């Protein structure tokens, strides 16, 4: 587990996640047996979707009668307990993708099953039988209801994910911020046709771990998501063992070779908020200046924040670099003789340099988002 943490730095629900490759839920398909057959190549899996109360179970029955794959049980809680039990000891972080008609329905399941799993609110299903009763994608049109479900689950001190579909809510970034402020721990985003540009908007709006979903079928596609804000990527229809194994192996190599598997692009090349870790002093006209303005940060606040964040770390060194500290240095993939001299003098490898930059990015995000108003808007 130490090796897993050092490689990817992912901890969710108190569990080290061994790889940022995730199986997304597919109704009637993704259950314990499906996950166990793929457990060697995934870090997390969301089973389901499961309907959990009378209204949603009736909708599931109607959908199944129409030929759609569905999980249909007389006692969904008993079935969920059986599935969770079968996955114990798998080494995979387990999430339950749930569809309920009221916040109380979600809370009732969490009370029965406990805090050993992640509870994922399905705000993604667009089947008319579900949306007609205000479930699935319908929740994205009524974000206050979605926030109520988050709060009902968080009142039980469990870990909460929201599976959402991009481009349905009026403003995805505002929705992400609302869900964060309501207590969500994780956002699982089906990007549809919006791609990494929409992912970057969401990343810049909230600090929650993000799972990018939709057509993640190759390492290159996964890297596009990682470079623009994703912490993990999920696969659904292409979650066959061969595809999962290939993407997992390539990500692990990337992590071991670079020290930061999901390092963002530099800001001047389209990077997200994390890329402030690579930005230099704000002394010239570049994308940093309008970005700081959008964040509500002055140049002086940015400089002080970054200098304080690297104090007593190797990144504070580097008198021979352009600005006298590696706090202002760029990515290891960008050739720089001065940075190379500085890392050698500090006794750190390129991989360790990037791990330090990752921790600096985390610190910058924490400081920026700690200052965000608690007002919930959407």
Image (spheres, rainbow, N blue to C red):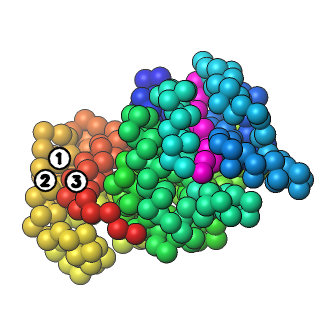
Residue 76: in magenta span: no
Disc 2 and disc 1: Cα gap in Å?
6 Å
**Residue drawn 55% across the image and 61% down it:** 139
Main SS of residues in magenta: strand
Residue 211: give x, y in percent of width and height: 53, 51
Q: Nearer the viewer, residue 68 or 306?
A: 68
Q: Quadrant of the C terminus?
A: bottom left
Label 3: few (<14), some or many (≥20) within 10 Å? few
Residue 40: give x, y in percent of width and height: 67, 28
Q: Of the residues under marks 3 and 2, which one precedes in the sequence?
A: 2
The residue tagged 1 is 310
Mark closer to the observer (3, 2): 3
Is residue 142 visible from the viewing direction of this image? yes
The residue tagged 3 is 370
**Residue drawn 20% across the image and 71% down it:** 296
The residue tagged 2 is 307
Q: Is residue 36 above or below residue 269?
A: above
Q: Is residue 118 above or below residue 139?
A: above
**Residue drawn 23% across the image and 81% down it:** 285
Give the secondary structure at mark 2: helix
Label 1: few (<14), some or many (≥20) within 10 Å? many
Query: Does residue 191 appear to the left or right of 282 in the view shown?
Result: right
Q: Of the residues under marks 3 and 1, which one precedes in the sequence?
A: 1
Query: Does residue 368 appear to the left or right of 107 in the view shown?
Result: left
For the record, the magenta segment spans 91-101
Query: Does residue 277 appear to the left or right of 140 in the view shown?
Result: left
């Amino acid at each position: 587990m130490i090796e897993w943490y050092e490689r990817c730095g992912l901890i969710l629900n108190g569990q080290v996640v061994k790889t940022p490759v995730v199986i997304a839920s597919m109704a009637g398909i993704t259950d314990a047996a499906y996950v166990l057959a793929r457990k060697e190549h995934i870090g997390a899996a969301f089973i389901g979707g499961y309907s959990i109360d009378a209204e949603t179970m009736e909708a599931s029955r109607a959908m199944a009668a129409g030929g759609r794959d569905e999980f249909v049980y007389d006692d969904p809680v008993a079935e969920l307990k059986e599935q969770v039990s079968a996955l114990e000891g798998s080494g995979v972080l387990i999430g339950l993708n749930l569809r309920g008609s009221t916040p109380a329905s979600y809370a009732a399941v969490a009370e029965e099953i406990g805090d050993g799993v992640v509870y994922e609110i399905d705000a993604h299903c667009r089947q008319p039988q579900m949306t007609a009763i205000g479930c699935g994608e319908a929740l994205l049109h009524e974000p206050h209801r979605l926030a109520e479900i988050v709060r009902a689950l968080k009142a039980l001190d469990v870990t909460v994910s929201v599976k959402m579909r991009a481009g349905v809510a009026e403003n995805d970034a505002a929705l992400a911020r609302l869900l964060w402020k309501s207590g969500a721990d994780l956002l699982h985003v089906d990007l549809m046709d919006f791609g990494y540009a929409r992912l970057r908007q969401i990343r810049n709006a909230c600090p929650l771990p993000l799972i990018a979903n939709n057509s993640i079928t190759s390492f290159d596609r996964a890297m596009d998501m990682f470079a623009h804000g994703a912490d993990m990527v999920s696969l659904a229809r292409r979650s066959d063992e061969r595809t999962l194994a290939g993407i997992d192996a390539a990500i692990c190599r990337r992590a071991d070779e670079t020290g930061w598997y999901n390092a963002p692009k530099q800001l001047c090349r389209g990077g997200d908020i994390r890329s402030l870790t690579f930005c230099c002093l704000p002394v010239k006209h570049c994308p940093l200046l309008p970005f700081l303005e959008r964040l509500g940060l002055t140049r002086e606040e940015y400089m002080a924040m970054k200098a304080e964040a690297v104090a007593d770390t190797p990144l504070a060194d580097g008198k021979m670099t352009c600005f006298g500290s590696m706090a202002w240095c760029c990515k290891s993939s960008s050739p720089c003789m001065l940075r190379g001299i500085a890392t050698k003098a500090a006794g750190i490898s390129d991989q360790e340099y990037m791990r330090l930059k990752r921790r600096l990015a985390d610190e910058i995000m924490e400081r920026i988002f700690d200052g965000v108003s608690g007002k919930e808007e959407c």
